[in-house]
Amino acid sequence: MDRGANLRAFNDAVIVLARGGIVAIPTDTLYGLAVDPLSRDAIERLIALKGRPSERAIALIAADRAQVVADLGALPPIAEKLASVFWPGPLTLLIPRPAFLPAELTGGSSLVGVRVPDDDTARELCRAWGHVLTATSANLSGEPPSDDPDHVAGVFHDRDVALLLDAGKTRGGLPSTVVEAPGDDVDEIRLIRPGAIAWEDVQRCARAE
């Protein structure tokens, strides 16, 4: 597995993604696995690599809110409000899935998760690619995710990961908080997975005038 997080590595990563390959990347929490979310072949390869159930959704990351809007459409009002406060950062928002996104990406759900991570390498890769990317945790299903690129390299050294963007250890800790925010009613927001951002802080922000 190639390593390095310089300009050449970003260019190499874009080539890998364009060919339907898998790239291991840092985020502001843990290392993740990036593929082109519009490629069914790449998604199937990612699911097979991790050995995860196909009904489990795969979340996305973006360079910024403008990229989210360009690729997925305007954020619902409550999601926009939360994004304006918590992005970049470890808050994944579940919003309506555009029809052109493969259903395999979300396990058939009508919602898709997306966030803007507070990590320069992850955002720069999205910027270099020009679109949102997947960022499911870089681990085998049932195994703990990792903040250590050396651990990620060891797990995937003989598997179907073409490139590792090694930016050193990430901050680690809890994964992103996942919140369903599909509309304009604050009472519709729902905590799907506790994580790095406290649910109380999310609720307080959503209800603020």
Image: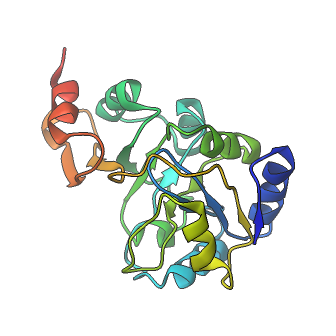
Left or right, 172 with respect to 81, comes to right
In the rendered image, which quarter contains the N terminus?
bottom right
Q: Nearer the viewer, residue 187 or 164?
A: 164
- Can residue 49 be seen from the camera position used here? yes
Left or right, 39 with respect to 65, comes to right
Which residue sits at x=40%, y=82%? Answer: 53
Percent x, y for residue 162? 74, 72
Query: So how many labels did they put on this image?
Result: 0
Residue 164, image quadrant:
bottom right
Q: How did the renderer colour the structure?
A: rainbow
Residue 182, image quadrant:
top left
Vertical relation: 49 (above or below) 168: below
Vertical relation: 39 (above or below) 207: below
Residue 144, image quadrant:
bottom left
Percent x, y for residue 209? 19, 14
Q: Nearer the viewer, residue 111 or 190?
A: 190
- Can residue 185 be seen from the camera position used here? no
Percent x, y for residue 188? 17, 42
Percent x, y for residue 133? 60, 54
Left or right, 75 with respect to 148, comes to left
Which residue sits at x=38%, y=47%? Answer: 92
Which residue sits at x=30%, y=48%? Answer: 177
Which residue sits at x=66%, y=83%? Answer: 159
